[in-house]
Image: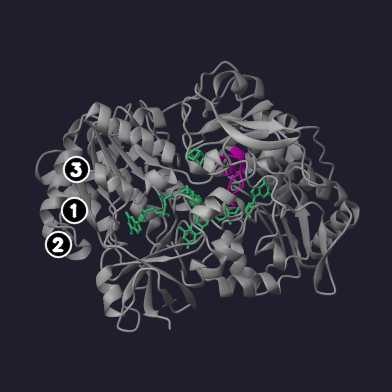
Amino acid sequence: MEKVITTCPYCGSGCSYFLCVEDGKVIGVAPNRVHPISKGRLCVKGWNAHEFVHHPGRLTKPLIRKGGNLVEASWDEALDMVANRLKGIKEKSGSDSIGVLSSAKCTNEENFVMMKFARAVIGTNNVDHCARLCHASTVAGLARAFGSGAMTNSIDELEHADVILVTGSNTIEQHPLIAVRILKAVRDHGAKLILVDPRSIQLSKFAVIHAKHKPGTDVAWINGVMNVIINEGLADEEFIKTRTEGFEEMKKLVMDYTPEKVEEITTIPADTIREIARTYARASAASIVYSMGITQHTTGTDNVLSCANLAMITGNVGKPSTGVNPLRGQNNVQGACDLGALPVVYSGYQSVADENVRKKFSEAWGAEMPSAPGLTVVEMVNAAADGKLKGLYIMGENPMLSDPDLSHVKEGLEKLEFLVVQDIFLTETAELADVVLPAESYAEKTGTFTNTERRVQLVNKAVEAPGEARPDWDIVSDVARRMGYDMKYNSAEDIMTEINKLTPSYTGITYQRIRENWGLAWPCPTLDHPGTPYLHKDKFTRGLGSFHAVPFKPPAEETDDEYPFILSTGRMLEHFHTGTMTRRSDTLDREVPKGFIEMNPKDADAIGVRNNWPVRVTTRRGSVVTTARVTDGIPEKMLFMPFHFREAAANMLTNPALDPIAKIPEFKVCAATVEGVQ
Ligand SMILES: Nc1nc2c(c(=O)[nH]1)N[C@H]1C(S)=C(S)[C@@H](COP(=O)(O)OP(=O)(O)OC[C@H]3O[C@@H](n4cnc5c(=O)[nH]c(N)nc54)[C@H](O)[C@@H]3O)O[C@H]1N2
Ligand SMILES: Nc1nc2c(c(=O)[nH]1)N[C@H]1C(S)=C(S)[C@@H](COP(=O)(O)OP(=O)(O)OC[C@H]3O[C@@H](n4cnc5c(=O)[nH]c(N)nc54)[C@H](O)[C@@H]3O)O[C@H]1N2
Ligand code: SF4
Ligand SMILES: [Mo]
């Protein structure tokens, strides 16, 4: 048996393991005991990350639509069709009538090639990916507050914090191997865990304080906590004076948010607000950890700015075991952002608005660079529905289950003149495509993923691809060549060499170095630079840290008599996103074979429903039948539904309202009603 070292394709923790290969098949996973994050452990998805690889549903040949059906075609026929149709749309309706969705499941090299394809070949900045649905508000908020939109500290450091404030992150289920570190801090080093989450989650058991608030009221509780910190003299005056700006204006606003007023908005008792303030502010090193409960709101950017305010007011930034730590979700969402699969930046966050940057890329790539900012994910869907976007190339995303308000998404995708989907399975989105291109999975190709702490790690080819599937970078470059642009790479490493040249923060990150070191964290500007485990040490990336006065605003949709429940959506341990991989893994599918909605026993009683009975959930967008999971872990008048299950798709229900700055949809709050089904 051969063992090939690689990086997990599921979450952003970035665990490493060996794929065990026998007779050309991956037959299991073996732990990597010396890896700095996983340290020989994995979660249930990592242990079973070989199972979907040889699933009979893998795409093995290109498909093209003929007479309404998708039928097998040769690569030549399919790629010529993609190139000709995209070229035709570009000539007739202009470059900006085409969009590209890149992928946080794909490698850094593939994201780089895809964003180059959008800009140099199509001539548009319409390139985005699922980070928009995830941490767009983190990127916008932390860039404003600190100058850089990434996790400020490393995973290792969590272990040595005195206080860890977790909010809107179900860490044990969604970032299990990061949660291991939080629990280690609590159990082995006496750290205090403060949890602010509307639901009971597995972390609740370990928290000294668990404040359950009304979803969508995060700005209010954070302002309340800062009100107490200021009034009780717990602020770090020295840090505020020397390292930050904008404090006085923020202080003025925060003075209105007394604990009593905050209790009315959030339902968190005033005394609990005081306790959170004292515990957090008195720590010598306090870390904030957050995820989608903070970001997926129309006030997502405000929520992130509030977290940054709280860290700065107590001087908890730029030191070990402190900081604001957004846990990035997908295996390579950090990398897809770093490599410029975003509508306003090239790789390394170099702005498309900057003439010098455009000139640099234009010279490197021999093509004119577009300067207008591109469309974001939900904007592309809207533009398609309005008939303005005519062609869409989707690599490794499944918006027909992951975008808000699916009826609208379907309308948009069906209206496109041409849709091409490149995936490893025939997804709900691929079913609507004109051409489907079969890609290699992580087990079949080489490249790099960048995890949530900015650590760039290798993915190594373990087995041959099924049928005629090809690596994503190779497919995209082939389309480029067929459109008359000379894009040729011999390997993923070849692409990394170009990334090194054009991306200052990745310049020192070579395959040879990351093979030796279990990865390197960017910024890594030179070949002998050791990488950067924590940011903003003596100086914020933007110079001074910036406080923002953030007033509380309610969610876009509030409850009323017709829709009296707050519906929140999210995830669970055993499944990942739209289920394309986990629902095709026997072990995981057996654990949780179908969808459900969590509801409080009192609410279940009121509509005459028991655990496991069918219920219909309805919002202004649509209706879905699923199964009630009755639990007192969720407060009354709140519902929680995972979005993994196509037959009970949560996004039939969600509100596509966007945060005005980050354009992230409000997946975490909408108004709903629920009834029993006979
Ligand atoms: N098993 C598994 N792991 C995953 C994923 C997966 O699909 N499955 N997806 C990955 C990805 S891409 C991501 S982005 C991460 C997401 O990871 P998380 O953000 O941890 O997961 P979610 O379930 O979306 O929501 C997190 C928590 O937010 C809480 N919440 C709901 N509303 C609010 C609110 O208004 N305020 C606050 N403060 N909290 C609220 C919920 O109760 C929930 O506990 O997980 C990654 N890891
Ligand atoms: N209601 C609700 N909706 C949500 C969220 C929520 O909390 N609530 N969360 C949002 C968040 S945070 C995220 S990140 C998004 C995720 O949204 P998506 O990214 O659309 O969801 P995934 O299921 O991860 O889609 C990844 C696709 O890539 C394919 N794939 C895997 N490996 C490869 C590869 O190597 N090459 C190619 N070409 N394809 C590959 C998979 O089969 C799958 O179809 O969902 C968002 N949607
Ligand atoms: S914690 Fe995340 S990276 Fe680690 S094994 Fe589980 S899914 Fe994979
Ligand atoms: Mo995500």
Q: Residue at x 14, y 51 (%)?
A: 272
Cα distance, mark 3 to mark 2? 23 Å
How many circles with numbers are drawn on the protein?
Answer: 3
Q: Residue 474: give x, y in percent of width and height.
A: 78, 42
Above or below, 670 against 199 in this view is below
User: Is 339 inside the magenta-drawn segment?
Assistant: yes
Q: Are marks 1 and 2 in contact (CB under 8 Å)?
A: yes
Cα distance, mark 1 to mark 2? 8 Å
Name the foreground residue: 176 vs 115: 176
Q: Within the displayed image, which quadrant is ligand 2 positioned in?
A: bottom right
Characterize the local packing of mark 2: few (<14), some (14-19) or many (20 or more) Cα atoms within 10 angstroms: some
List the residue tagged with mark 2: 261
User: Is 316 inside the magenta-drawn segment?
Assistant: no
Residue found at the far top of this picture = 528
User: Disc number at residue 283?
Assistant: none
Characterize the local packing of mark 1: few (<14), some (14-19) or many (20 or more) Cα atoms within 10 angstroms: many
List the residue tagged with mark 3: 208
Please state if 381 lies on the left or on the right of 114 as rendered. Answer: left
Q: Residue 104: give x, y in percent of width and height.
A: 59, 47
Name the foreground residue: 118 vs 250: 118
Secondary structure, mark 3, is: loop
Q: Quadrant of residue 552?
A: bottom left
Secondary structure, mark 1, is: helix
Question: Which contiguous range is marked in magenta?
Answer: 334-347
Q: Residue at x 81, y 41 (%)?
A: 487
Q: Residue 411: give x, y in percent of width and height.
A: 63, 75
Kind of residue at disc 3: Val
Q: Earlier in the sequence, mark 3 or mark 1?
A: 3
Q: Quadrant of residue 676?
A: bottom left
Characterize the local packing of mark 3: few (<14), some (14-19) or many (20 or more) Cα atoms within 10 angstroms: some
List the residue tagged with mark 1: 224
Q: Residue at x 30, y 83 (%)?
A: 561
